[in-house]
Image (cartoon, rainbow, N blue to C red):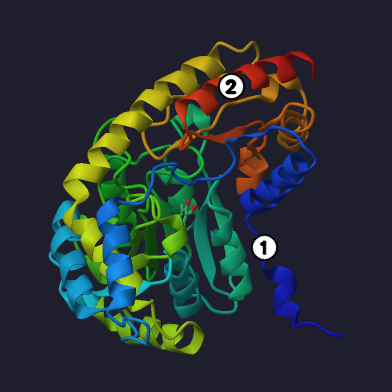
Amino acid sequence: MKLAKRMSRLGTETAFEVLARAQQLERQGRDIVHLEIGEPDFSSPASAIEAGIAGLRSGLTKYTTTPGLLELRTRIAEIEGPRRGLQLSPEQVVVTPGAKPIMFYTILGTVEEGDEALYPDPGFPIYESMIAFAGGKPVPYPLREANGFRLDLDFIADHLTPRTRLVILNSPSNPTGGVEDRESLGRLAELLRPASAWVLSDEIYSHFIYEGSHVSIASFDAMAARTVILDGFSKTYSMTGWRLGFGLMPLELVPHVTRLIVNSVSCTPAFTQKASLAALETRAHTIPPMIDEYRRRREIIVDGLNAIGGVRCVKPAGSFYAFPNVSAFGRSSKEIADHLLDPGGVACLAGTAFGHEGEGYLRLSFATAMEKIREGLSRISSALARL
Ligand code: PLP
C-alpha cells in the first residue's frame, strides 16, 4: 500500500533506536552502561507524585481545557516570565503533553512549502525532521568546537533570506552543551529584527547552566512578539515520562497552536497538570541539588574523557551532555559508537545523530549516576584502546 510522500521526509531520534539496541543486548544477558538517553536519573518530585495520585483519586480523569488549566498557565507565567526578564499573561502560556509538541506545532504553524528554516547543526534531530515534514527547506547553521559550539553570526547573516520563515535556537544546547551569551543573542536579535522570521527558542535546559546564566532571545527588544519559547517539566523536574511541556508565545499564535492541539491530542491530562503545579511549588528544594550533582558529574566525565588518549572534550557550559571529539581515531562517529556499544558495553550516540557537523564527535549524557559514569569511562577507555 502507498504511503503519503511526506512520510519519506520525516526523520527520527537515534537515541531511542540506540536505547532499543542496548536493551536487546541486555536481554541477551549483556551488561550495558547507558549514556545515550537524555533522561535525568533523579526521581520525580514527591510533591508531584502525591498531587498526581490525589488528582486521579479526586476524579481528574476526564478531558480538560485544550491550552491547559488556567491555574497552571498562571503559575507558569508568573515563574517562567520573570526568570527571562519577560512579563507574560497566562493566555500566552500553552501546556502540552511533553515539550516536543511545541516544536511540532510551531514548525507546522509557521513553515510552509518553499520556506527556509535555520536550525543548529549539530542539533536536536527533530528540528530538521519537522521542517522537512512541513515542506520547508532545512538550512543548517554550524556550531563548531573552535567557536565554543556557539552561534556563528556571520554564517547566520549570510543565510538569512527573504524566504527565511523560522530560526531555531537551542541554548543550552543538546548535544554540545554550548550556552549563548547576552552579547551574541543581542547581536542575533539585531540581525533578525528586519527579517520576517519567527523564532523558536528551545530553552528546555535553561536551568542547567554551570557557567554564566540563562538569557532568552525573547528578552531583546521586539523579539517577544515573534518568539516561541519551548520549555517543560521533563528535564527540570525529572518528569520525562509524565509528558508535560509548555510554550510561551505571542498571543497571536495561541489560537493557532490551540487548534493544532485540538486536532491532535485534544488536551494534556488534568492530573499530570496538577502534578506539575505541585512540582513548581517545591522547585526551590528540588532543582538546586540536581544542578549541583550535574556539576560534579560534569567534572568527572570531562576529566575522564580528556584522560583517554585521542579524546578531547570541551567542558559543556550547560545541559547534561558531554560532546567529546574522537576524530583522532580516524573512524566515523557511528563506527566508534557502534564499537563502544558492542563489544564495549557502553551506549552513547554518534555526533552524526545530530547532523553532518557532528562527525568526529560522540554525545554522552551525564544525567546518570556517578558510578555508572565512572564504569562507562573505564569501558570507553579500554574499548578505544582496542579499536
Ligand atoms: N528539546 C530538546 C533540545 C531536547 O533535548 C528534548 C528532549 O530530549 C526535547 C526538546 C523534548 O522534551 P520532551 O521530552 O518534554 O518532549
Q: Where is residue 281? Give x, y as percent.
A: 17, 57
Q: Is residue 218 visible?
A: no
Position of 366 relative to 257 (above/below): above
Q: Which mark is residue 375?
A: 2
What amino acid is labelled 2 in the image? Glu
Q: Quadrant of residue 226?
A: bottom left
Q: In the picture shown, does residue 125 fall above or below 183?
A: below
Viewed as shown, does residue 47 lie left or right of 25? left
Q: Is 373 or 13 nearer to us in this picture?
A: 373
> Which residue is depicted at the point 44% across and 30% down?
148
Q: Position of residue 290 (x, y in %)?
A: 31, 37
**SS label for mark 2:** helix
Residue placed at 17% from the left, 52% from the top?
83
SS for dot 1: loop
Q: Is residue 160 visible?
A: yes
The residue shown at (59%, 79%) is 113
Marker disc for residue 11: 1
Asked whether 87 or 236 is in front, the reply is 236
Mark 2: few/some/many CA within 10 Å (<14, 14-19, 20+): some
> Viewer-proximal residue, 146 or 257?
257
Q: Earlier in the sequence, mark 2 or mark 1?
A: 1
For the residues labelled 2 and 1, the Cα–Cα distance comes to 32 Å
Query: Is residue 9 or residue 264 the one in the foreground?
Result: 264
Is the distance from the Cβ of mark 1 to the nearest ligand 1 atom less than 8 Å?
no
Where on the picture, by quarter, is residue 94? bottom left
